[in-house]
Amino acid sequence: MYLIIYRIVGYRRKVVRTNIQNSFPNWTKDYHLKTEREFYVHFCDLIVESIKAFTISKKELEKRFGQRNPEIFQKYFDAGQHVTVVGGHNGNWELYAVSVGLHLPHQPLALYTKLNNEFMNEKITKSRSKYGLWMKSYEEAKEIIKRVNERPVAFIFGSDQCPNIKQKPYWTTFLNQETGVQFGTEKFARDNNTPVIYGFIHKLKRGRYEIEYRLVCENPNELEIGMISERHTRMLETDINNEPSYWLWTHKRWKRKKKDFDMYREELQSVA
């Protein structure tokens, strides 16, 4: 599969190469190429493993995906507190989605946007949620958090997607590039006063992963606006620097610039 996707088809090879070069401008060309090749080997693993996730058993899943320190959640669960969990597209997030319901004391709930393809949306949602994960929209999550006397929920966000032009992202420097970070994680945590926990998926070897959790903050509203986004972005950046081959380099993370958002706001104002 590697030979076909990378060597013959060259799937998004220009995107991957540009992303790696821009993210690590001080690296040599040889190290850029080494990371690129290692990524495509991992990417092919990811495709096969994600297909297997549709039918994987609990026993097999527990062998292949571990939780390094799920006890970080316990004190918040015992106190009846919801938590906000944030991470990026590293390692195998599909196996994480399928397995997370087997490990956390909280009820895991992943925030997602419905796919345009109804068939794929149904299949992916069914696969991810078969061992306990809830798949909900942002609006549905806001309603769920209002409920009382129920099992506390861990609201899971992906932070490393390119913001929609209609959103107001938090702007920072990420991997040596001006980057808009989706503000939904921070806004949700502030609005609902939930502790924020960051998770990073390590690839131990082929077919074996483990997630490590770290506390971002306990009291979101005690921090200045933007600090939560800044903290979890820096955590992800550090982890990518340490394990660069396993992040999703095919994603067009930087396709929109700050000027695009500024121009969109100006156009709205002129119409108004």
Image: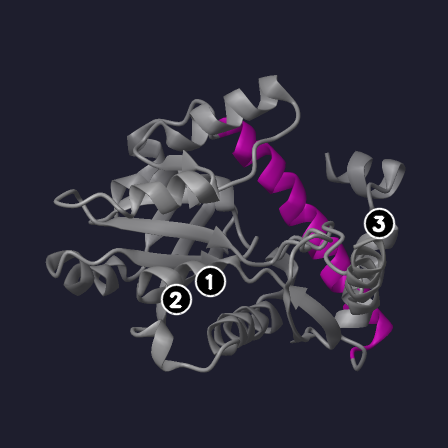
Tell me: residue 4, above or below residue 54: below
Tag shown at residue 187: 1
Tag shown at residue 190: 2
Residue assigned mark 3: 13
Residue 226: image location, x then y, percent: 53, 76
Label 1 environment density (alpha carbons within 10 Å; few <14, some 14–19, many ≥20): some
Distance of label 3 from label 1 (alpha carbons): 35 Å
In the rendered structure, which amino acid carries the disc numbered 2?
Arg
Q: Would residue 85 appear left or right of 148 to someone viewing this image?
A: right
Q: Disc 3 vs disc 2: Cβ atoms closer than 8 Å?
A: no
- Range drawn in magenta: 27-52
**Quadrant of res 17:** bottom right
User: Of circles 3 and 1, which is in front?
Assistant: 1
x 66%, y 45%: residue: 43
Q: Which quarter of the figure is the N terminus placed in?
A: top right
Tell me: residue 93, above or below residue 222: above
Q: Along the line of sight, which residue is nearer the eye, 180 or 52?
A: 180
**Quadrant of res 81:** bottom left
Residue 44: image location, x then y, percent: 66, 40
Which comes sooner in the sequence, label 3 or label 2? 3
Q: Which structural element holds mark 3?
A: helix
